[in-house]
Amino acid sequence: MATNTKLPNRVTIIGRGVPSNYEISIDGTIEEIETESREDETIVSGQVAEGVIETGVQRFRFSGQMANVHLVDWNGTPAPESPSTPILHIDYGVSDRNDHS
C-alpha cells in the first residue's frame, strides 16, 4: 500500500446497483487501494483508472490533482443526466488509516 506522503489523496466510487463504467484520470500517480465490488474489472495504467462497478465501493489513492472524470450508466447515459451512475467522492490530504473505514 502507498504511504500517505506519496499518494495523499483519495477517490471513492460507490455503485448504485446498475452496471456502470467509470474512467478517472489524474495528473500524478494513481493506484487501487480497496475494492468491495462484485466486479473486479479495474484497469490502472499510468495516470488513468477505469472499470465497471454495479454495487460496492472501489477506492484509489493518488498524487496531484483530478484531471478528468467520466461516469456512464449501462446504456451510456453520462452523469449527471443519469441517476444510476456511481457516486464519486474526492478527498485531498487524507491519512492512510481512513482507507478501510
Image: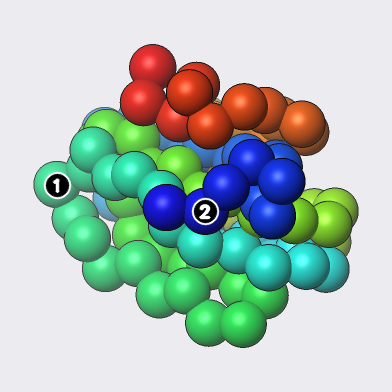
Residue drawn where x is 36% and y is 26% of the image? 100
Residue 77 picture location, percent across and down: 55, 54
Q: Residue at x 67, y 28 (%)?
A: 94
The residue that label 1 is drawn on is 38
Q: Nearer the viewer, residue 75 or 41?
A: 41
State the image coordinates of residue 1 (x, y, percent, origin top left).
42, 52
Q: From what the image shows, is residue 53 above or below residue 93?
A: below
Disc 1 residue type (three-letter): Arg
Q: Is residue 38 visible?
A: yes
Is residue 82 shown to the viewer in this render?
no
Q: Quadrant of residue 75?
A: bottom left
Residue 92 is tagged as: none
Instruction: Report crowding for label 2: few under 14, some 14 to 19, many 20 or more residues within 10 A (C-alpha).
Output: some
Say which residue appears at 77% left-offset and 33% top-offset.
92
Mark count: 2
- In the rendered structure, which disc, 1 or 2, sits on the residue that comes first in sequence? 2
Label disc, if present, on residue 2 of the rendered structure? 2
Does residue 49 appear left or right of residue 15 in this picture?
A: right
Residue at 53% over, 82% down: 45
Instruction: Farthest residue to the left: give it.
Output: 38
Q: Amino acid at mark 2?
A: Ala
Relative to 66, is 12 above or below? above
Describe residue 18's horizontal placement relative to residue 45 as left or right.
left
Element type where label 2 sits in the image: loop
For the residue pair 74 and 34, the one nearer the viewer reads as 34
Above or below, comparing residue 29 to residue 63 in the picture = below
Q: Residue furthest bottom?
A: 46
How far, Cα to Cα, is label 1 from label 2? 24 Å
Q: Position of residue 36 (x, y in %)?
A: 23, 38
| Residue 52 place in picture, x, y as percent | 34, 59
Q: Residue furthest top?
A: 101
Image side of residue 41 versus residue 31, left or right: left
